[in-house]
Amino acid sequence: MKTEGQIRIPSGCAISAVISKNGNKLSGEPVINSMKPMHDRSNGLGGGFAGYGIYPEYKNFYALHLFFDSRATRKECEAFLKERFEIVQSELIPTRTVPAITDKPIVWRYFAAPLQSVFRPLQLEEKEFVARTVMEINAGLPGAYVFSSGKNMGTFKAVGFPEDVGLFYKLEEYEGYSWTAHGRYPTNTPGWWGGAHPFTLLDYSVVHNGEISSYDANRRFIEMFGYQCTLQTDTEVITYIMDYLLRVQKLTLTEAASVIAAPFWSTIAAKADPDDRKKHTFLRTVFPSLLITGPFSIVFGFEGGLMALNDRLKLRSMVVGEKDDRVFIASEEAAIRAMEPDAKNIWSPAGGEPVIVKVKEGALS
Amino acid sequence: MQIIDATNLDFKAINKALRQAETDYTVKGCCGQRFLAAGMSGKSLTIEGIPGNALGAYLNNAVITVNANAQDAVGDTMNEGKILIRGNIGDAAGYAMRGGKIYVQGNAGYRAGIHMKAYREKFPVLIIGGCAGSFLGEYQAGGVIIVLGLHKDGRRIVGNFPCTGMHGGKMFLRGSCEKICFPKQVTARCAAAEDLEEIREYLSEYCLDRKSVV
């Protein structure tokens, strides 16, 4: 079989997320349940989750989750990592046998800190060094793939339906303040473990329903800045765009949303506030190659929060709801009801209108 | 009255039960099952919970009442009958409907009434109680879309780009349209008495439905 990156097949998908604004611990179970009513949006070729705040005991270390095709690859990758990182824990990610999940690679995690003696002389910031290491492994070490690289967060993904993937990774045993989930219906790529969502870099993660038509334009632009898109999957490029805009360019979340889901020029021209008009004109002018066209609804996860965003034409559905300090986001209201039957203030954000939910200041310290 | 408990049933099982039912019936505990009552005729059903996408697709003269919100593509290509949504409706409501009525008490998402069309005795009617999202009546070719603007959160009655590609039918927006930009091929004017007379029958029915107790 050809794997991800070698073939492109011309997605319905399901996304879902929950966050506690008080930073309360939520098990992975509700978000797994939310995927059940949306079962038919996936086809069993990919499911995955990201949990934030799940590794408090290792919160100062990068949690690197990797797929390996063999023990030899793992040894080779470990030797590479040890030259750059202090590894404080190295273990198999606990899984249970689920009949529907087959062909599993070696699923491993490291808790590690980059060696200052290595990255300081390179005059790199720590996060940049970690990001480059991830790129080097994913592009240069066949058989090894880093699918999660943030602190105190982790991604769990596989080929299968999301509810089976959640069971496989025992996510009911983890507790985090926010969770995102994805059920995949791959349309352009064959469906491999690495190609399942969420896509992550550092603590940023993206789950995506849609099919972006600007993929190649976006990819060509972002690859100029050291990002390497290895999977031909549109979600991967969204992840790198967000990393570039937020971490490298230091834009705010709202500004980044205005770049990737920029309003039409006619909508910008009709804006009443001249400063707002000027800002949008500036962002569209400076980052034209990062406008993402075609249908998408995404949930973007980061340390301490979530952002939901639709493409400017809103070609995919997305619903938001609340209950007490929890906020829910999903492709369908039914998914929110599966997490919280009594959810209130159900509404649909407009196309290009970001919904940003953050854990209250101080709740996570 | 027959009751079908939809908890743990998939859409096929529910639709099978619906087809076999001989009386009016209520579906309880609905949570996202798609295609409910697809192609159904001559029956009346009430749905408790959240029906999934494409509720009443190809509906053929059945009557559906939803006592909550509905998701996307309600009444996709419906032919005849009526769908009453007591909450809000998702995107693409009445997608390509060519007959029958969809009455929404709350707001509508994007692309309500996309590709609606009328033909001979067929005349689709979509009434939205609150406001509608962008691309209302996109490619509308026939029938009538009415937005009443009864919502109270101050949002504009319709989002951006209404009537894009519209080439037939009528749309009524109750309220100020000053800031709304219509495409060139559309004629926009204040409704005359005879225009309102055309829709009186539908509005009366809509008001009665709205008053009726759940």
Image (cartoon, grey):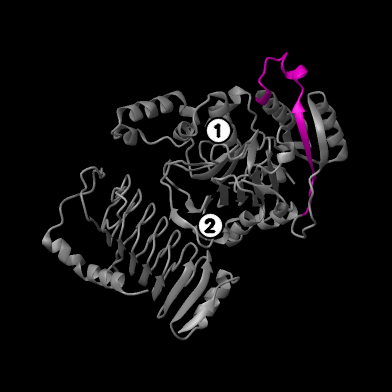
Residue type (three-letter) at the residue carrying disc 2: Ile
| A171 relative to A265, above or below | below
CB-based contact (under 8 Å), mark 2 and mark 1: no
Instruction: Give the chain of mark 1.
Output: A
Which residue is nearer to you in this view: A227 or B3? B3
Residue shown at 45%/23% (left/top)? A286
- The residue tagged 2 is A336
> Label 2 marks which chain's residue?
A
Q: Is residue B187 left or right of residue B44?
A: left
Magenta-colored span: A102-127
Q: Is residue B64 above or below residue A307?
A: below
**First of labels 2, 1 by sequence position:** 1
- Image vertical order of residue A123 relative to residue A193, above or below: above
Viewer-nearest of labels 2 and 1?
2
- Tell me if mark 2 has few (under 14), some (14-19) or many (20+) residues whose alpha carbon lies within 10 angstroms of its own: many
> Which quadrant would residue A5 be assigned to in this image?
top right
**Could you say where residue A90 lies in the image, as x and y percent from the top left?**
82, 37
Which disc, if any, is residue B32? none
